[in-house]
Image (cartoon, rainbow, N blue to C red):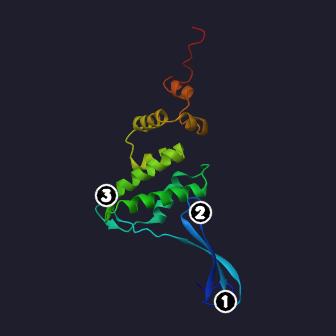
């Protein structure tokens, strides 16, 4: 390991311990034998990931940045921590590595993302689903939202805003000014 202070290649490990929110990293304190500067490094296991088979049939390497970009677009202006996004990416990579297959269809990755967003943020789930599932009509969009709300646990109901306001949904059918008052 190269010393960041003097550039020497001769360093020694002073201390090692498991680190990270999921205990997936090794934190090492190192000391340069030349200048005695101390610094910290982190090591993370690198997964052997399968190639992705796109809908067109094209085979490409798994692109973590593309996954991160898709998640960020779905989560734009949502109250989700960067650590949670990184945890989702790591979980998807672990799932892919555990498949032990040389290839995986992009649809399978999309399903993993949908499952992760379902648990993380419902607005982001609907945003991602609207593109991934290619809703053909407003009705299919509404049905997806209703299915999502039917799946909510009491804890999720308390922590998430409603996707469709019942009062608004009931008044959608009535035109403005069609009040029954005074009849």
Q: Quadrant where the C terminus lies?
A: top right
Residue in the foreground of this view, choosing between 124 and 95: 95
Give coordinates of residue 114: x percent, y percent: 44, 48
Residue in the foreground of this view, choosing between 181 and 6: 6
- Of callouts 3 and 2, the N-terminal one: 2
Question: The residue tagged with tag 2: helix, strand or loop?
Answer: loop
Write down the residue under mark 1: 33
With 14 as the anchor, is 134 left or right in this view?
left
Mark 3: few, some, or many residues within 10 Å (few <14, many ≥20)?
A: few
Question: The residue tagged with tag 1: helix, strand or loop?
Answer: loop
Q: Residue at x 60, y 9 (%)?
A: 182
Quarter residue 51 falls in = bottom left
Work out which residue is located at the far right of the displayed protein and give it: 36
Quarter residue 144 falls in = top left
Question: Disc 3 to disc 2, how far (Cα)?
Answer: 35 Å
The label shown at residue 55 is 3
- Is residue 128 visible from the viewing direction of this image? no
Question: Disc 2 to disc 1, how far (Cα)?
Answer: 27 Å
The label shown at residue 20 is 2
With 155 as the anchor, is 62 left or right in this view?
left
Q: Residue at x 64, y 89 (%)?
A: 7
**Which numbered disc, 2 or 1, marks the residue closer to the eye?**
1
**Which numbered disc, 1 or 3, marks the residue closer to the eye?**
1
- Of callouts 1 and 3, the N-terminal one: 1
With 92 as the anchor, is 35 left or right in this view?
right
Q: Residue at x 62, y 49 (%)?
A: 79
Q: Quadrant where the N terminus lies?
A: bottom right
């Amino acid at each position: 390991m190269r010393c960041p202070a003097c550039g020497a290649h001769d360093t020694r490990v002073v201390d090692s311990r498991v680190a990270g929110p999921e205990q997936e990293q090794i934190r090492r304190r190192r000391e340069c034998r030349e200048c005695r500067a101390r610094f910290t490094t982190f090591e993370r296991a690198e997964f052997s990931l399968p190639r992705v088979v796109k809908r067109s049939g094209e085979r490409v390497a798994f692109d973590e940045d593309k996954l991160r970009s898709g998640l960020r677009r779905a989560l734009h202006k949502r109250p989700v921590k960067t650590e949670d996004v990184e945890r989702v990416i790591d979980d998807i990579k672990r799932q892919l590595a555990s498949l032990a297959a040389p290839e995986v269809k992009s649809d399978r990755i999309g399903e993993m993302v949908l499952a992760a967003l379902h648990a993380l943020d419902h607005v982001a789930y609907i945003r991602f689903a609207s593109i991934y599932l290619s809703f053909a009509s407003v009705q299919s969009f509404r049905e997806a939202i209703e299915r999502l709300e039917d799946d909510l646990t009491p804890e999720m109901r308390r922590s998430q805003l409603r996707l469709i306001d019942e009062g608004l949904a009931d008044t959608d059918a009535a035109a403005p000014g069609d009040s029954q008052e005074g009849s």
